[in-house]
Image (tube, rainbow, N blue to C red):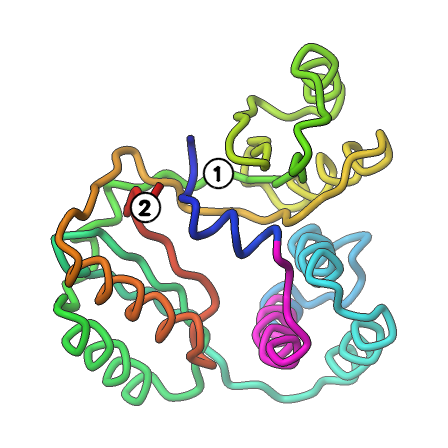
Amino acid sequence: MAGHSKWNNIKRKKGVKDTARAKVFTKISREILVCIRENGSADPAVNGRLKDLISKAKSNNIPGDNIDRLLKKAAGGEKNDYDFCVYEGYGPGGIAVIVDCLTDNRNRTAGEMRHFFSKCGGNLGTSGCVAFMFEEKGVVAVDNEEDYIGEDEFAERVIESGAHDYSFDDGVIEVYTDTAAGAVTAVSEALEQAGYKILSAQNEKLPSTYSELTDEEHIKKMTQLLDLLEDNDDVQNVWHNWNDL
């Protein structure tokens, strides 16, 4: 499977629980505020990156009213001091991990990242130590839980949508696009209009090779590391090359 792991697919298919929805909205809200600040426009018609983030918010079942209120606040010049930063390191057993963050306090976030990796038997590395093992692509995840989608018909839809390629795996189809602003949303909307259920649509870092863990303690610690990172308010995305199928 090009992209992720069973762990990621399970997250996609089960959706966002009510107890975690507020945290997800907070994270996406930060991305939207920073996007508008950097691009100077709260209009998704002219800000392709913002359009992608709105699509991401909708795929996480965030109500449209919440999104509209956020856009109005951002258009009104709401101040935000969030900076984008990336941390790279190794989990237990040498698993490559990249963590995308938005933070208003780099020292705090760096300390937390270092603590999480160390606590779980890994170590935080220097910039570029694992980035070369990943490639960024636009990814639209399509629900195929019941295996109802025929590959021949779907291949035609993929071509019509403007996407590059696709991969069937474990109840989810990943469709790959380029990473230009608005590209992933355009493909997502085309597939949705064709009748497919979209689970997620965003630019992602895909590993070129995967690593397996056989030691039960390593598996336990890697799962703990992923949970700690995902639960941290400053963490936007976590990418890894653990093949946990």
- State which quadrant residue 22 falls in: bottom right
Q: Are marks 1 and 2 in contact (CB under 8 Å)?
A: no
* Residue 232 position in % (x across, y down): 42, 79
Q: Amino acid at mark 2?
A: Asp
Give the side of residue 105 with respect to residue 63, left or right.
left
Rendered-image quadrant of the N terminus: top left
* Residue 120 position in % (x across, y down): 19, 72
* Residue 226 position in % (x across, y down): 34, 65
Q: Amino acid at mark 1?
A: Lys
> Magenta region: which residues?
14-35
Magenta stretch holds residue 21: yes
62 over 188 or under it: above or below? below
Mark 1 or 2: the one toward you: 2
Q: Residue at x 31, y 41 (%)?
A: 134
Residue identified by numbered label 2? 244
Q: Residue at x 87, y 75 (%)?
A: 65
The kind of secondary structure element at disc 1 is: strand
- State which quadrant residue 245 falls in: top left
Q: Residue furthest top?
A: 152
Magenta stretch holds residue 120: no
Give the side of residue 83 with respect to residue 63, left or right.
left
Q: For the residue carrying disc 1, how many other residues have a C-alpha within 10 Å: few (<14), some (14-19), or many (20+)?
A: some
Q: Residue at x 41, y 46 (%)?
A: 205
- State which quadrant residue 211 falls in: top left
Residue identified by numbered label 1? 137
The kind of secondary structure element at disc 2 is: loop
128 over 124 or under it: above or below? above
Q: CA distance from mark 1 to mark 2?
A: 21 Å
